[in-house]
Image (tube, rainbow, N blue to C red):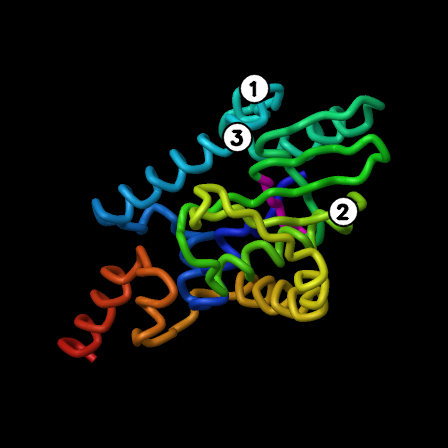
Amino acid sequence: MPHLLSKSKYIRGLQCDRALWLDVHEPRLARYTAEQMRRFDRGREFEYAFKDTFPDGIDLSAELKRNVDAYPELTTMYLEKEAEVDLFEAGFLYDDVLVLADVVRKNADGTLNIYEVKSGNVLSETYKRDAALQHYVISHCRSINKFCIVYNGENRFDIIDLTEELEEHHDEIARNIAAMKEILSHGEPDTPTGQHCLEPYACPYQHYCAQGVRQMSLFG
């Protein structure tokens, strides 16, 4: 079943409704700087290093690659088996939102331990918002034992259990998703540029929106 939102699009939507619309309808317009690409690479390297601590983990992306809408079905297949299992990039779909969890451990009682891996050395609010969306989606699909964020702290892999805190945001997330669906059902928002173009992340559509501002100033 095709999805409408992902965790990256959800975070984008919290930052700017126009960036969300472009991310869904015109992603070809995105431009990433060399530094942004290096940050993505560092994040992947840290994630891979943590996954190496699960030597028997099964990487769903090795089989499915970019066919992301197939991830939930394959995830269900593995989780329906009686055996305990560790999965990388397990997919869950709820409310038209697809999330791929970095590491999912299925316990003997069938509950899940989720580990979301972040390469930063500070547990930021953006990380928590990302994790809260994943908790919202996954908890509507499976029973969660604990949901942890792994970040690059004093002990290399600092793990903090945020299960109870994340549960408190479900109503807010449901409202946000409904609002984003409404935005995506209409034409491109005419959102002006501002400080939100830089926080919490530099928006890859800044050049596009700035061009529109220049056009309006010249010909408006």
Whether pointer 2 and pointer 1 mark residues with C-beta atoms closer than 8 Å, the reply is no
Q: Work out how far the residue at label 2 is from the one at label 3, CA to CA, in angstroms.
A: 20 Å
- Disc 2 marks a residue whose amino acid type is Ile
The residue at the point 60 percent across, 40 percent down is 101
Name the disc covering residue 144, or none: 2
Q: In the displayed structure, would residue 115 be above or below residue 130?
A: above
Does 98 appear in magenta?
A: yes
The residue beneath circle 1 is 63
| Left or right: residue 45 compared with residue 106 | left
In percent of width and height, residue 142 lies at 79, 43
In percent of width and height, residue 203 lies at 33, 60
* Element type where label 3 sits in the image: helix
Q: Nearer the viewer, residue 118 or 66?
A: 118
The residue beneath circle 3 is 51
Q: Work out how far the residue at label 3 is from the one at label 1, CA to CA, in angstroms.
A: 17 Å
What segment carries the magenta color?
A: 96-101
- Disc 3 marks a residue whose amino acid type is Lys
